[in-house]
Each structure stands twice: as structure tokens, then as C-alpha cells.
Image: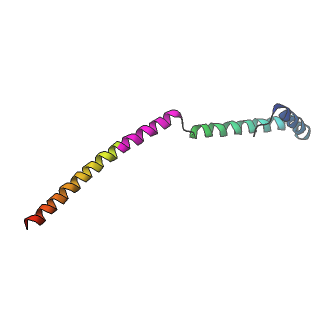
Amino acid sequence: MYLEAKETARLYKLLTEKLGNDTTEAMFKYIDNKTERSVEATIKTLATKDDIANVRKEISEAKAENIKWMFIFWIGNVGAMLAIALLILKK
């Protein structure tokens, strides 16, 4: 959650009165650094347009590969069924 400049200044003033300038400054730096690291970590896990394009390409390649193997399987099945039918008819 982001505070507006007015709210940040008010909070800084209140904390300075209670904790002192050095402690308040250190706390604000800590919060800024922690927030920055959190945002950077989140950005690293987000997918980019290139990532999505690569996934789409991989999916289309996998579909083509699956279709190829399906036809090979079907041809093998038809061949086996014809062989069985011919064996039965010859008897």
C-alpha cells in the first residue's frame, strides 16, 4: 500500500518525535528496501510477451507431433485389423 506524500510526511514527523530522527530514517530505508526487493521478486516471476510466445510455439509444435503419432497409431491399428481379418477369412 502506497502512502501519499502528505501522509508520509505526517507519519515521518510523528515517528521522529517518538523514535528520533536516526531510528525513523533507518526504518523508512528498511521499508523502502524491503518493498523494492519484493517488487523485483514479483517482476522476476511474471511472464513476458516473449515467454507467452514461446509457450504458444511449444504448444503448436506439441500438437503437430501428437497428430503425427496419432496417424501412425491409426495406420498400425488398421494394418493389424486387416491382418487379423485376413487370417480369420483364410481359415
Tell me what residue is drawn at x 33 percent, y 44 percent.
Answer: 65
Q: Can you name the residue that lies furthest to the right here?
A: 17
Q: Is residue 57 left or right of residue 89?
A: right
State the image coordinates of residue 42 (x, y, percent, origin top left).
Answer: 62, 40
Q: Quadrant of the N terminus?
A: top right
Q: Is residue 24 left or right of residue 61?
A: right
Q: Can you name the residue that lies furthest to the left here?
A: 90
Q: Is residue 12 left or right of residue 42?
A: right
Q: Main secondary structure of the magenta part?
A: helix
Indicate whether residue 66 is drawn in magenta. no
Indicate whether residue 52 is drawn in magenta. yes
Towards the viewer: 42 or 32: 42
Where on the picture, by quarter, is residue 20?
top right
Q: Quadrant of the C terminus?
A: bottom left
State the image coordinates of residue 50 (x, y, percent, origin top left).
Answer: 49, 33
Q: Is residue 79 left or right of residue 21?
A: left
Q: How is the image coloured?
A: rainbow
State the image coordinates of residue 48 (x, y, percent, origin top left).
Answer: 54, 35
- Which span is picked out in magenta? 47-63
Where on the picture, by quarter, is residue 80?
bottom left
State the image coordinates of residue 7 (x, y, percent, origin top left).
Answer: 85, 35
Tell me what residue is drawn at x 7 percent, y 65 percent.
Answer: 90
Towards the viewer: 30 or 3: 3
Q: Can you name the residue that lies furthest to the front here?
A: 89
